Image: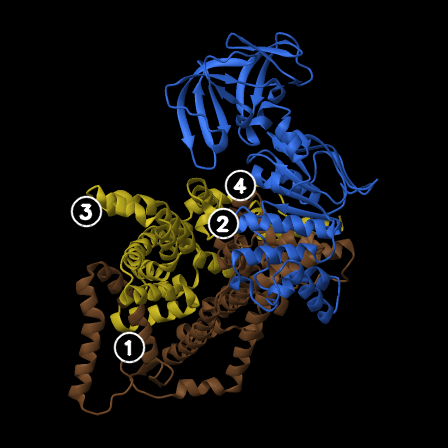
Chain colours: A yellow, B brown, C blue
């Protein structure tokens, strides 16, 4: 029927439009000549290895990876105690702390970028270094893993803990043998999300890196402004592939709908 | 932990005592009782809360020449908010944020609803897809849209080739380009925000509507949307706030007249080294954001029973 | 012709067949139950009648018209879901008159009709209440009122009473039946409770593993079950594995039994099941002589006041006898007895 067909068309159209940039970027990256044409004129994969050869790209890549790896670890390391604190002791202080953790991500990133820049360059006088960005990302992106870990903790049946206690497990043992294993998938998912977001993040890296520390997105925009080369596009494609791999892994090893807040069916 | 609102006497000693009590009672004591919260407090406190306070402080500083600034307490920067140039820029930002959020929701609401009804496997694949799109850097999205809308390679050229357009003028940079980019950027976010509530919509509710004679379209309008209304509103506010902070998209896809708020801040801070004004702009944005977030929370507090009348 | 006809209706979900080759003729104005254990396909069948699922094969006709391709919202049905599915964002009268609202009826008319229907389901005065402020039984009635608002041709209910407490359930069974008789509307309910089906229905359709096992009047099914499954599912029954000797005789445990009711298609030498209701079984002293008897020993006596159940171990199987207090046999555990299975009460069916 007409309505059913319209619905089909709408859904397909949405998927097509949503994936359009991916195809464009992929197409551009395959240009044989050093020009950004779409559809590509001549097909060549030669721009991909360039990312690993040219210093400017390799540096940016290493910088981004370092920030992402450590920033995500930092974020999760802050998120875990905060969520656990709230879940275990529902005192006001825990709630305030949790609220504080929610704030960074709720504000437009430009605010965090600005605040951090002023903090580091004015107050501390130690700016433009990779550590700045690691800390900034770690703190800014706390919200994501915090919410996920909380979801994970909420799903733990408290009766399990009581049962463990009746079997003689002390608080530490209960944490390490029951709570932690059940929360680990959420920690990993949180880490994965922060990793991907950090890799793609622009404005905080831009503000804090000044011109000294350059991340991949910053480099991409810079090279787009200065000169065109499909290398830029191939970098973008690798980003996309990274995201696909990471999220597919998360989906494979955990319940993705539940992670994103879906209602578990009663049966 | 509330700071008592009334400090009656000017006595410095009394004030110091009060701050001490707040500090010790509110922060130190709980930490001593629950050492678990020590590490997060330090990290979030030092690396987020403190910079925040500093930013507020700096917004009152005095600008010296066009090079530096020194400690002071003046409201000159806030006064600039009322200048016509600033209000014009603010209006542009508000316009973009509101329009892109609204357009985004028009497509995202039905799409998310359909998505939540997919069977398990396709649903997971679709969610992974949405997450990947969401994770795309603003830079990549802005660049892709510039290609899509360009004279040489994008939609205008396509339409020109087909014969629907007279001349393949580039559609970017410009107002519509920025709007497209912003809307596109918001869609995956909207989908993920609307997703939880969509999954809670009992399938039997829409089936019941059908047994009562409602076509799928009418069912969507009279049952689905009213039940998702709170989520839709909260999502709109979220998107609005989020878009107010857009940086790369208007930068790449827009002309100078399409400058948005975040660009203003970057401009003042990085190019003109006018930290106080940038800070004032930041504070203003924070206040607006917090106000809108508070509204969202208030909306969420009201009891909303989405599941069908379960006993 | 009027009424509901299902012909060859089958439903497959991937590799799973939920309903196989169902042929039903449901007359107008009757109260029908689809009865069976969970997973037997009864709910799927109901949903196909409602149009919420489309059959993989077969057709559904209502009053002579083929409604198989017609979507749910164009079929003239009223349905009560297991979860009731009352709209939480509308109050009671808005829920009830929803169907009228989308057809453009005026507000005053809708409110009036809602009040009428609330009177019908014996829940007056709650028009303006929110759904969340109603009790389970009240919501039940609102759901029924809503389904009946547009005077549908079919009234379908999916396990409508399963979440009510026992007492309310029994009351609602009677009320529902009386409501149906008053309106004369063709009603189909899905239930797993055989007592419910027996209480309310004109006809019972017993289903198991995606097929219809038997359809008939409650008492008929009880007395003459078509298969071992039906015999066991409806009420309690003694089931004895037997070998067919002739059209009136079977053999079990070395004894021969004469039977009056044998299912068609059972030839000599075939394996079959003999079903006899406990209340028909007689427990007699061991000195008694007569046909259709077995020796046994009493292993258990369950005396609940209103009835007495005696468990007799006859070698390979235990036979249960049910008696009223008047006929209470004076028996104790360990007594040797004879158990009589009267020929007119025995039904032999396919296993």
Do the residues marked 3 and 2 share a common chain? no
Residue B127 visible: yes
Note whether A161 is above or below C214 in the view shown: below
For residue C165, which numbered disc appears in the image? 2
In x, y percent, where is residue A186?
Answer: 37, 48
Q: Nearer the viewer, mark 1 or mark 4?
A: 1
Count of marks, rendered view: 4
- Residue denoted by label 3: A170
In x, y percent, where is residue C264?
Answer: 69, 17
Q: What element carries label 1?
A: loop
Between C23 and C349, the one nearer to me in the picture:
C349
The N terminus of chain C lies in which quarter of the figure?
top right
Q: Is mark 4 on a helix, strand or loop?
A: loop
Note whether A147 is above or below A178 in the view shown: below
The chain identifier of the residue carrying mark 2 reads C
Q: Quadrant of residue B178?
A: bottom right
Q: Is residue C95 left or right of residue A246?
A: right
Do the residues marked 3 and 4 share a common chain? yes
Residue C16 visible: no
Between C249 and A12, the one nearer to me in the picture:
C249
The chain identifier of the residue carrying mark 3 reads A
- Residue denoted by label 4: A45
Between A224 and A3, the one nearer to me in the picture:
A3
State if disc 1 and disc 2 touch (CB < 8 Å).
no
Inter-mark Cα distance, 3 to 4: 58 Å
Inter-mark Cα distance, 3 to 1: 36 Å
- Residue denoted by label 1: B2
Q: Which residue is drawn at 16% across and 82% down?
A: B17
Do the residues marked 2 and 1 share a common chain? no
Inter-mark Cα distance, 4 to 2: 70 Å
The C terminus of chain C lies in which quarter of the figure?
top right
Q: In this view, does C341 lie to the left or right of A102?
A: right
């Amino acid at each position: 029927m007409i309505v059913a067909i319209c619905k089909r068309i709408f859904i397909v159209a949405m998927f097509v439009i949503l994936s359009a940039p991916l195809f464009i970027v992929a197409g551009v990256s395959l240009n044989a000549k050093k020009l950004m044409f779409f559809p590509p004129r001549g097909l060549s994969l030669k721009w991909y290895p360039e990312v690993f050869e040219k210093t400017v790209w390799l540096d940016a890549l290493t910088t981004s990876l370092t920030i992402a790896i450590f920033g995500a670890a930092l974020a999760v390391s802050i998120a875990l105690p905060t969520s656990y604190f709230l879940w275990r002791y529902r005192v006001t202080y825990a709630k305030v702390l949790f609220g504080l953790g929610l704030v960074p991500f709720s504000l437009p990133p430009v605010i965090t970028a600005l605040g951090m820049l002023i903090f580091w360059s004015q107050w501390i006088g130690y700016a433009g270094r990779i550590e700045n960005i690691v800390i900034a990302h770690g703190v800014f992106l706390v919200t994501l893993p915090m919410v996920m870990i909380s979801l994970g903790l909420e799903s733990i049946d408290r009766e399990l803990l009581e049962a463990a206690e009746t079997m003689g497990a002390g608080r530490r043992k209960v944490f390490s043998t029951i709570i932690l294993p059940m929360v680990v998938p959420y920690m990993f998912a949180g880490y994965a999300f922060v990793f991907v977001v950090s890799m793609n993040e622009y404005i905080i890296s831009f503000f804090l890196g000044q011109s000294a520390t350059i991340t991949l997105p910053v480099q991409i925009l810079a090279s787009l402004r200065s000169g065109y080369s499909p290398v830029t596009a191939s970098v973008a494609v690798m980003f996309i592939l990274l995201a696909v791999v990471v999220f597919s892994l998360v989906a494979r090893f955990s319940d993705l709908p539940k992670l994103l807040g879906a209602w578990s069916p009663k049966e | 932990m509330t700071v008592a609102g009334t400090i009656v006497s000017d006595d410095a000693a009394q004030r110091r005592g009060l701050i001490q009590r707040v500090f010790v009672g509110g922060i130190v004591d709980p930490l001593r009782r629950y050492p678990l919260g020590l590490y997060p407090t330090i990290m979030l406190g030092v690396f987020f809360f403190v910079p925040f306070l500093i930013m507020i402080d700096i917004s009152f500083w005095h600008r010296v020449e066009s090079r530096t600034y020194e400690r002071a307490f003046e409201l000159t920067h806030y006064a600039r908010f009322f200048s016509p140039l600033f209000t014009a820029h603010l209006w542009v930002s508000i316009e973009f944020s509101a329009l892109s959020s609204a357009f985004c929701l028009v497509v995202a609401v039905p799409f998310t609803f359909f998505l939540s009804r997919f069977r398990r496997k396709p649903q997971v694949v679709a969610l992974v897809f949405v997450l990947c799109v969401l994770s795309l850097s603003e830079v990549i999205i802005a660049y892709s849209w510039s290609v899509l809308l360009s004279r040489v390679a994008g939609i205008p050229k396509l339409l020109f080739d087909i014969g629907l357009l007279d001349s393949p003028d580039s559609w970017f940079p410009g107002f519509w380009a920025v709007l497209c980019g912003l809307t596109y950027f918001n869609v995956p976010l909207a989908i993920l925000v609307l997703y939880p509530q969509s999954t809670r919509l009992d399938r039997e509710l829409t089936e019941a509507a059908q047994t009562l004679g409602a076509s799928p379209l009418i069912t969507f309008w009279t049952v689905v949307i009213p039940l998702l209304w709170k989520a839709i509103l909260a999502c709109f506010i979220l998107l609005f706030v989020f878009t107010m902070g857009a940086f790369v998209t208007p930068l790449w896809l827009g002309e100078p007249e399409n400058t948005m708020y975040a660009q203003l801040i970057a401009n003042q801070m990085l190019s003109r080294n006018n930290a106080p004004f940038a800070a004032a702009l930041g504070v203003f944005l924070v206040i607006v954001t917090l106000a809108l977030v508070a509204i969202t929370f208030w909306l969420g507090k009201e009891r909303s029973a989405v599941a069908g009348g379960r006993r | 012709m009027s009424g509901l006809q299902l012909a060859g209706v089958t439903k497959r979900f991937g590799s799973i067949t939920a309903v196989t080759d169902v042929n039903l003729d449901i007359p107008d104005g009757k109260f029908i139950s689809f009865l069976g254990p969970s997973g037997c396909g009864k709910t799927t069948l109901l949903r196909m009648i409602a149009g919420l699922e489309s059959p993989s094969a077969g057709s559904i006709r209502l009053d002579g018209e083929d409604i198989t391709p017609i979507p749910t919202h164009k079929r003239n049905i009223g349905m009560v879901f297991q979860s009731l599915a009352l709209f939480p964002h509308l109050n009671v009268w808005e829920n009830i008159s929803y169907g009228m609202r989308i057809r453009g009826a005026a507000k005053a008319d809708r409110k009036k009709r809602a009040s009428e229907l609330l009177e019908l389901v014996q829940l007056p005065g709650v028009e303006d209440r929110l759904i969340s402020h109603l009790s389970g039984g009240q919501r039940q009635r609102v759901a029924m009122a809503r389904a009946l608002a547009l005077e549908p041709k079919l009234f379908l209910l999916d396990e409508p009473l399963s979440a009510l407490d026992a007492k309310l359930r029994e009351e609602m069974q009677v009320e529902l039946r009386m409501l149906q008789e008053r309106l004369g509307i063709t009603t189909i309910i899905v239930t797993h409770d055989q007592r419910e089906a027996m209480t309310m229905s004109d006809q019972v359709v017993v289903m198991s593993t995606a097929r219809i096992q038997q359809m008939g009047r409650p008492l008929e099914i009880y007395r003459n079950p078509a298969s071992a499954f039906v015999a066991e599912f409806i009420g309690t029954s003694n089931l004895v594995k037997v070998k067919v000797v002739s059209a009136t005789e079977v053999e079990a445990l070395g004894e021969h039994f004469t039977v009056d009711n044998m299912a068609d298609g059972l030839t000599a030498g075939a394996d079959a099941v003999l079903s006899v209701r406990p209340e028909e079984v007689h427990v007699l002293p061991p000195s008694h002589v007569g046909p259709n008897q077995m020796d046994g020993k009493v292993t258990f006596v369950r005396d609940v006041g209103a009835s007495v159940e005696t468990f007799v171990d006859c070698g390979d199987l235990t036979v249960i006898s049910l008696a009223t207090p008047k006929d209470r046999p004076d028996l104790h555990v360990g007594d040797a007895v004879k158990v009589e299975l009267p020929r007119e009460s025995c039904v032999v069916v396919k296993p």
